[in-house]
Image: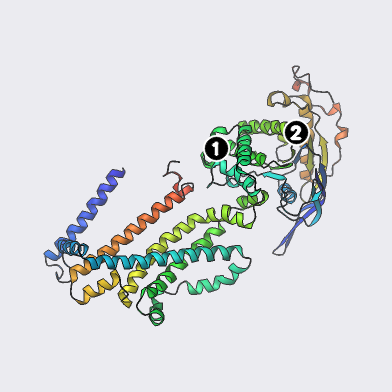
């Protein structure tokens, strides 16, 4: 069954790529703005042979990784603190609901004012966007603590810190993992956006340069690279999730323990 | 060992005032196994949580070993009904049993010894590396019992521990608990809604009234110390005692006062003669 699924998936992808080759060649769309698959692949190969491309990729990944790490650490810390401190949750709920929907891109002018076009601008946007994903998940996860588990821990003399570590954290972990997976995707979007709009060094800036210099196949090739990055990040996050949550109902069937 | 004095608990919230427990007074001697039965919804769980220091009573007090309970006492262990939720699914069996010991700051060798001993005495030596959810319900409850034993409590509270397992498993677990109690000399307070279970297990049965709860009657179970599922449950004296408890619970549900103390339990109340089994002559006549 799995083999058949993979085969169908590969066939679908091949058909999509063939369509991308055929449509411009048949003159249905303007080849200048929509180059056929083959030319995009050629441009991609060219990019891979260019040292500047790898530097740009490294810049993007650096912004993504540092931003995500800061957002996850801050989100988890803030989430746990808010949930274990009496009244803090109620006091912060409306503020969180107000700040969370602000699109991170709306902060681009602020980022430029504060940090110019450097890495710190990218980080500001990435952290702002990813932080809420993690925080909201942690807040949900912490509420999921089973009262019987909590009472058991109390009955056996576990103090506040021990209960956070042995009951609250493992209970919230599935939610945290979901939050991290969402945040990882959002962080990549924001990293590329920041580079594209602000001009901070990275794949986004390289796409902008390709666009202004009419290097259309190269532009597409870079877009494909960002897509592949997103795919890899998602697969990686899911793998980490499955390993960390081998005990969880949603994973139990998949992993032999 | 366990002293409950004038215990009362009133829940107040959102304009409603519910008196769950009115005035409970009883004691459990050191090394005694006492069963608490009562009609469903009579506040058994509330009582147990107050005794376990998980709830603060609104009146009265609980003393364990002469010390007043203000939080979970360090020499008391609890076995909950919902074993699936009481055991942590993210920890293996060994870690579940060991966790409370780590909080007790016991050394590694001592902890390993206690865990191995506890798991052995519930017959789960082979399952130490498994996750609780890989085990059957009965085995999971054995893990919970092992966790309580490893904690080396003076007092063991059991809150309807076998209500969620099948009848055969329940019989096995009842014998396990009675065996462990006799072996280790722990003081056990066993809460149940199952009348047969209370009579079979207990040295004494406390019958509670309907909510707001008071102790309706204290009944000494004068069955021999050696009990087994096959013979004890068909003994005439067992039938008398369970009938008496059953009647009291029914009366408690109807709300009639306790009209017939246990001392009045005369041979006249005994069930039909055909229930008697000539093979079980070792049981004392009342």
Chain where mark 2 sits: B
Q: How is the image coloured?
A: rainbow
The mark found on residue A72 in the picture is: none
Instruction: Specify which label sits upstream in the sequence, 2 or 1.
Output: 1
Q: Is B255 placed left or right of B108 in the picture?
A: right
Q: Residue at x 46, y 45 (%)?
A: A252
Q: Quadrant of residue A14?
A: bottom left
Quarter of the rendering occupied by the N terminus of chain B: top right
Q: Nearer the viewer, residue B277 or A159?
A: A159
Image vertical order of residue A243 relative to residue A86, above or below: above
The mark found on residue B128 in the picture is: 1
Q: Quadrant of residue A46?
A: bottom left
Q: Are marks 2 and 1 on the same chain?
A: yes
Q: Is residue A133 visible?
A: no
Q: Quadrant of residue A127?
A: bottom left
Q: Which residue is mark 2?
A: B199
């Amino acid at each position: 069954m799995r083999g058949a699924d993979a085969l169908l998936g590969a066939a679908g992808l091949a058909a999509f790529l063939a369509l991308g080759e055929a449509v411009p060649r048949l003159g249905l769309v303007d080849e200048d703005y929509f180059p056929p698959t083959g030319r995009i692949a050629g441009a991609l190969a060219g990019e891979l042979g260019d040292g500047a491309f790898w530097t740009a990729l490294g810049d993007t990944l650096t912004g993504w990784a540092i931003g995500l790490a800061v957002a996850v650490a801050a989100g988890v810390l803030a989430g746990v603190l808010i949930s274990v401190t009496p009244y803090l949750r109620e006091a912060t709920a409306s503020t969180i609901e107000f700040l969370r929907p602000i699109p991170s891109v709306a902060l681009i002018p602020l980022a430029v004012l504060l940090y110019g076009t450097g890495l710190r601008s990218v980080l500001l946007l990435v952290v702002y966007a990813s932080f809420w994903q993690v925080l909201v998940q942690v807040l949900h996860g912490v509420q999921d603590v089973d009262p019987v588990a909590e009472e058991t821990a109390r009955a056996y003399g576990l103090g506040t810190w021990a209960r956070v570590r042995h009951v609250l954290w493992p209970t919230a972990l599935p939610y945290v993992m979901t939050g991290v997976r969402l945040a990882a995707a959002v962080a990549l979007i924001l990293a590329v956006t920041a580079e594209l709009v602000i001009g901070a060094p990275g794949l986004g800036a390289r796409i902008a340069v390709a666009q202004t210099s009419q290097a259309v196949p190269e532009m597409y090739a870079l877009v494909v690279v960002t897509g592949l990055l997103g795919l890899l990040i998602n697969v990686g996050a899911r793998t980490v999730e499955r390993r960390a949550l081998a005990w969880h109902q949603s994973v139990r069937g998949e992993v032999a323990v | 060992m366990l002293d409950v004095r004038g215990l009362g608990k009133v829940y107040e919230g959102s304009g409603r005032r519910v008196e769950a427990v009115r005035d409970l007074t009883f004691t459990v001697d050191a090394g005694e196994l006492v069963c608490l039965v009562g009609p469903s919804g009579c506040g058994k769980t509330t009582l147990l949580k107050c005794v376990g220091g998980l709830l603060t009573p609104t009146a009265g007090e609980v003393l364990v070993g002469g010390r007043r309970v203000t939080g979970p006492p360090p020499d008391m262990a609890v076995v909950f009904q919902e074993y699936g939720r009481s055991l942590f699914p993210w920890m293996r069996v060994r870690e579940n049993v060991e966790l409370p010991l780590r909080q007790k700051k016991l050394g590694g060798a001592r902890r390993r010894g206690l865990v191995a001993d506890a798991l052995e005495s519930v017959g789960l030596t082979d399952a130490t590396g498994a996750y609780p959810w890989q085990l059957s319900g009965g085995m999971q409850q054995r893990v919970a019992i092992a966790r309580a034993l490893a904690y080396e409590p003076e007092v063991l509270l059991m809150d309807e521990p076998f209500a969620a397992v099948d009848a055969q498993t329940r019989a096995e677990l009842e014998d396990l608990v009675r065996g462990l109690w006799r072996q280790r000399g722990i003081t056990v307070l066993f809460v149940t809604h199952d009348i047969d279970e209370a009579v079979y297990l207990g040295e004494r049965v406390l019958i509670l009234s309907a909510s707001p709860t008071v102790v309706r009657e204290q009944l000494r179970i004068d069955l021999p110390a050696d009990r087994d599922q096959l013979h004890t449950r068909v003994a005439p004296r067992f039938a008398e005692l369970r009938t008496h408890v059953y009647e009291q619970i029914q009366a408690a549900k109807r709300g009639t006062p306790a009209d017939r103390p246990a001392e009045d339990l005369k041979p006249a109340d005994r069930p039909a003669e055909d229930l008697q089994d000539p093979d079980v002559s070792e049981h004392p006549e009342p």
